[in-house]
Amino acid sequence: MKNILNRTVGWLKAERIFTAVLCGLLLILLYSGAGISPRPTSMPPGEQSVIPDNDLLKTIRSGHAPAVALHIYGLLLIAGLTMLISGIGLNIRGWMRGDWRFFPAGRTVGVPWTLVTVFKAVVYFLFSFLLILNLEAVWRDLTAGELSSSSTSLLVGNAFIQYALIVIFVLGLASRSGVKKIASGRYRSEDEFSRRGSGDLFGFPGLTVRYWRGDLRRAFKGYIQFFPILIGLLFISLQVMEIFNIPYRPNPLVGPLLGKDQIGFTIILYLIGVIAAPLAEELFFRGFFFPALMKKIPVNPSILISAVFFSSLHLNWHDWLPIMGLGVLLARSYQKTGSLLVSIFIHAIHNAFFLTYTVVLIELTRG
């Protein structure tokens, strides 16, 4: 025990910048009182289910629903039903052939960083983001509350900031880990970044756009095959929520859509949900955390643990089970194909479908 304590103290002394940031984070948490300040958004728009209620069904039957929204709603139902039937067919065919799998095997990707590096990224992110939130609180006090903490612009701005910070810290620490390992002579091309020369962007393993067409096809097929399972998880989640009487809480970023028409804000929602969120979250959860976890424990437990963290950190208990299932699919896609672009495409497809569904339902309710 004493040896472990001495090694930890020695490591903290060597990592002076990290130690300073860690102390700063603890001070911010103490200053904030109850710990972490509320996030600007509990989850990216699109990663939540929206179930039509009786008022919506009455609006549709009454004939007062907007025509365009009603047509899009019909197309979404057809698309969902098509994916459901196609997914069932793909799974049955795979079982009958004895070759049931979501993704074909691709290159194996190794990483030079460890869970310690992941912990550093989390600390850097929390320190930076909580510092920004506290500075915003000070600014609101100085301006006599002119900038509301729930204002649309602030929510959107904070969403972009948190995703930008994730990308910066992940890419920065991943690059630094690779450079340190090469310099120390412990970087071996045959077992880590086995094909580094294949066009990985920023030197990040699996992040390449060279084969984006094939990655997009694999993403569509994998998501369609998973779609029946997703619907089953949504159904189970709804039943559990009803049993325990857990109320549904909409995403705070989607909330402003319930008010007046805001086309510009809807476009920003799509930029966040379909581009920013998939890129940042896949970089961290699948590209950064998941492979570091696999260096310590077997593949399947690593997939499950990364999916549990992915779902839990969305802070959306109503849809925890479906998001966890999605996390399993995303981790499996990266583990099998070795391409982070496949998981990014799947994430973007999922968010785009359910975000469009949400926006259309809100338009129909408003009508």
Image (cartoon, grey):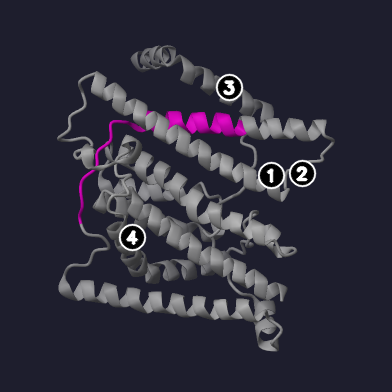
Residue 238 drawn at (x, y percent): 53, 68
Name the kind of residue labelled 2 in the image: Ser
Q: Which of marks 3 and 1 is in front?
A: 1
Which tag, 4 or 3, sits closer to the chain's start?
3
The residues colored magenta run: 105-130
Which residue is disc 4 drawn over?
216
| Neighbourhood count class around disc 4 (C-alpha, 10 Å): few under 14, some 14–19, many 20 upward | some
The secondary structure that most of the magenta stretch takes on is: helix
Q: Is residue 98 left or right of residue 300?
A: left
Name the kind of residue labelled 3 in the image: Gly
Which tag, 1 or 4, sits closer to the chain's start?
1
Q: Nearer the viewer, mark 1 or mark 4?
A: 4
- For the point 49% across and 66% down, which residue is it? 353
Which residue is disc 1 drawn over?
154
- For the point 41% across and 30% down, which residue is it? 172
- Label 4: element kind: helix
| Neighbourhood count class around disc 3 (C-alpha, 10 Å): few under 14, some 14–19, many 20 upward | some
Which residue is disc 2 drawn over?
148
Q: In this view, does 127 lie to the left or right of 291?
A: right
- Label 3: element kind: helix
**Which circle marks residue 24 in the picture?**
3
